[in-house]
Amino acid sequence: MLDGYEMTVGLEIHVQLDTDTKIFCGCKNEFGAEPNHHTCPICLGLPGTLPVLNEKAVEYIVKAGLALNCEINTFSKFDRKNYFYADLPKAYQISQFDLPFCEDGHVMIQLEDETEMKIGITRIHLEEDAGKLNHAGEGIASSDSSLVDYNRVGTPLIEIVSEPDIHSPEQAIAYLKKIKSILEYIGVSDCDMSQGSMRADVNISVAPTGSDELGTRTELKNMNSFKAIEKALKYEPKRQIKVLESGGEIIQGTLTWDDEAGKTIPMRSKEEAHDYRYFPEPDLVPVIVEQEWVDGIEDSLPELPDARQKRYVEELGIPEYDAMVITADREMADFFEAVVKEHNDAKAISNWIMGDFSRLLNEESITIAEVKFKPADLAQMLKLMDEGTISSKIAKTVFEEMFATGKNPDTIVEEKGLKQISDTSELEKIIDQVIADNQSALEDYRGGNKNVFGFFIGQTMKATRGKANPGMVNKILKEKLEG
Amino acid sequence: MKINKETVEKVAHLARLEVSEDEKELFAHQLSDILDHAEKLNELDTEDIAPTAHALPIQNVFRKDEVRASLDREAVLANAPQKDEGMFKVPQIVD
């Protein structure tokens, strides 16, 4: 795709932890509250206040570290990152510099060609989020003032830094989705990108294929949509190559992604003159993470997507791809397993989950938690199919009705009169009528045109509004037509 | 260690301080003296001493994840030079 060049992508993923309170004070950690309702002297950075670390935030970052195969540092500390910005009331952010909680992790990603790839994680550190700026007018550059809401200040954030192992947009997206899936599984964050609880800084560089050195990189900050990231990753390397090919140089700096124009735009480089002057945070003492604590957290981890996927393939016998799609979303996998518990045909269940179920979820844009029917209802519907009470065609109707109303399949079949007709004498009567109504087709058939058979099947189904047992119709029709 | 005028200017800019030409000379001199004084610590042999992360020999001070009352917004905004819609109003950020 990139003739003679290879792209390298680095991702710094910021994830808000789902604690009840902020990282250093007892203010509520909640999205969407009225502006400045969840603030206190500590998160407002008033002089003389002291932060106290939320134990849960440490537990969550250790949990994330374990789930992402990291080493957990026994000795960890916080540092001050100094800069002036209106969203940062203290004029410094409490973060971690040289002794983060987690280092040297990795995740496995699966690509479309079914290859598997390991993406390294350099480190995960814990820090506080900044406030939210609301710009009047057109945007940050054109407004003459901004309004600041400090509710978000002090929300616990983990920053997951990847190794330069990613070399395509597809790999980047697969990595992001894997991280999101794992963090949702372990319940440390809702990872809701639309609310900003997961967002990424994306570093992009290109270098001639085979070169040992990475090219100069540009950075896109605070990207919160997979689609935008993918588009930016398709655009930016090509832009960089064009600059290099025409004898130019890549200027290291921050860009913004203009989604409408579909291109990256440089931000003023003056803002880049960062010198954060990190130093150890004097208001917080170090944290020693005892092995016993780590072990306890490790024991509390649920089965993670990779293990679950393997189990589905090996024990339930569903295809690798189905297993990957279903396990990517914990709620989806939980739902699937609940149905499997009631009905032992995992492949049939996976077909419904991957097919009509996913389609309807998308069309209605609802989550699994909002689904009206219960896993047991789907199991019951499959039983009705197996017993021959409903045909597979009718099952589709039943399923859609279940999805729309939450009624159980027995009720739907009863109310709508969808029961399959498997009574021989009843079917014979219907088929006799169909044949009587179509004498010329009958003559065609008997004259050797066997293709007319399908027409008779269609007419019989039409007469029964799809409820006739297809196997029996086939058999009876054959007998009658052969005469 | 010698601190020159350019370093003083850079540090002053990072701290958003305005300093006069005279002050730049004065501070360059004073900061050099302070650093020279601190340099003396390098004379100590710290071979077997673990790095100090904090002046206090204490670790693991935590609070439980329990919600406490936040400040009343009136109080939060009481000293804001400018406010609007329950928020702090600040001047243009990017020029």
Image: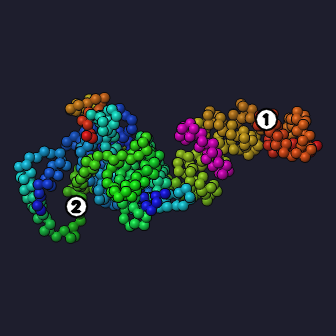
Q: Would residue A397 be found to the left or right of residue A457 on screen?
A: left
Which is nearer the eye, A96 or A168? A168
Q: Which residues are magenta?
A: A345-370
Residue B57: percent from left, percent from top: 23, 58
Residue B54: percent from left, percent from top: 22, 57
Task: Considering the whole magenta stretch, tell me its main secondary structure.
Answer: helix
Callout 1 amino acid:
Lys
Quadrant for the C terminus of chain A in the image: top right
Query: Would residue A13 be visible to someone looking at this image?
Result: no
Residue for point 14% across, 51% down = B9
Residue for point 88% across, 38% down = A441
Callout 2 amino acid:
Thr
Q: Is residue A457 above or below residue A316?
A: above
Residue A336: percent from left, percent from top: 60, 47
Which is nearer the eye, A332 or A111? A111
Residue for point 88% across, 45% down = A449
The disc at residue B52 is 2
Q: Nearer the viewer, mark 1 or mark 2?
A: 1
Q: Chain of mark 2?
A: B
The disc at residue A462 is 1
Q: Secondary structure at mark 2?
A: loop
The disc at residue A32 is none
Q: Chain of mark 1?
A: A
Q: Is residue A255 above or below residue A406?
A: below
Q: Would residue A168 be found to the left or right of residue A417 on screen?
A: left
Residue for point 60% across, 56% down = A320
Q: Residues within 10 Å of mark 2 (few under 14, many from 20)?
A: few
